[in-house]
Image (cartoon, rainbow, N blue to C red):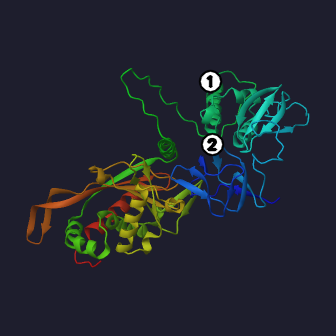
Amino acid sequence: MAEIEIRLPKMGESVTEATITNWLKNPGDEISLDEPLVEVATDKVDNELPSEAEGVLIKQLFQKDEVAQVGDVIAIISTEGGITPDEPGQESSSSENQEELPIKAEEPKANKMDSIAVSTVSQNSNGSVRITKNGSDGQFFSPLVRSIAEKEGISQNELESIAGTGAEGRVTKRDVLAHLRQESNSTSNTEPATKTHEVHTPQMKEAPIVVPSGEDQIIEMDRMRKLIADHMVMSKQVSPHVTSYVEADVTNIVNWRNKIKKAYKEREGENLTFTPILIEAIVKAIKDFPLVNVSVSGTQIIVKKNINIGMATALPSGNLIVPVIKNADRLSLTGLTKSVNELAVNARENKLKPEDIQGGTYTVTNVGSFGNVMGTPIINQPQVAIMALGAIRKVPAVVETPEGDFIGIRHKMFLSHAYDHRVVDGALGGRFVRKVADYLEQFDINRDI
């Protein structure tokens, strides 16, 4: 019987793991090529993964709400058919369709999962493992959790003592890593212990515990909000943020857009907003200052060849997602407008594809859409810079003319440029945002589109 391993594919430059949110097929179900198999969620987008083969699903190696790493085998499909659990002739050792797998007696191994107290291991059809000790049922642990436990030297008893936050109280990867951090912190403040773990995650200060009163409302973070929170904290820990501000006079742009927006809507069937005009200026400045279009890997600076602009977009849920305009420097203003509108609509309707959020090299966030005049945005790792676009306001300003200066009404906005001070110094960061403002102020009011 030919068996095909279905692996979690790469779904973005910075995406290394995904949460299994829902299995669309159960063991024993037939599945066609490219038919949706499983729903997964990353810190950027939810997505359905299609089957890479036609046949019968025989194993699910991760359960709902468990985290799989990119490249992990998440399912096995038989291309020659198989016997479903309800068909006659299939041997089963229990009502839960578990197969008893004998384990050879081995010498005791200190701090390892395969302790001598374990007599048998039962494996469900979905790949999770039940450990039976001395005739009594133990807990379920996914292959990923068992792998981390073995790597970090966590004994069976210690693993079973960890409070699980997964489905039905199961221990997840996050639970194990949190346990390791807690143990590391406790051992660092006491006498040297006989057993320590090498923790490969950055040390973080413990968040304060807040005790709500009887009148307070408690709202549990949804999955995406938790992932966004983790990503933002990581970015602030990794990159020393510096922000430079410039006020730009965009009167010419406002007047030009007011003049042509009606004809553009009739011709193209969609609105011309300020966002693509502002992105066009940013792209021009990136070509002048390519060292803001980089990523950092250890001590290496990777200068990106492509200019892919991430566009932070608010979702109806209040969460945030960043679809990406690929090769923005190759698009005309009309092309940028269509890309901006299409990505914004797809984001709000949850129709973004994994490739729509991959490969960003510089991010733009429009805080002006909320009525804010400026902001201090957090860098979208692994990028090194991000720009916040403030609201366009009518303000009194000094206007210089050959006949003399006078006070006039102008349309102005603030540009807030946050950058990673490890690789972008104040001179580069400040000159870049000033260059963006120059391109905006020099906009040709007679331009055709």
Q: Is residue 166 visible?
A: no
Q: Position of residue 214 (x, y in %)?
A: 38, 20
The C terminus lies in which quarter of the figure? bottom left
The residue pinned by badge 2 equals 66
Q: Is residue 105 left or right of residue 99?
A: right
Dot 2 or dot 1, earlier in sequence:
2
The N terminus lies in which quarter of the figure? bottom right
Which numbered disc, 2 or 1, marks the residue closer to the eye? 2
Please identify the residue farthest to the front as the structure is shown: 88
Q: Secondary structure at mark 2?
A: loop
Circle 1: residue type = Asn
Q: Is residue 175 left or right of residue 212?
A: right
Circle 2: residue type = Glu
Residue 308 vertical position relative to residue 169 in the rendered view, above or below? below
Q: Is residue 324 left or right of residue 42?
A: left
Residue 436 image-quadrant placement: bottom left
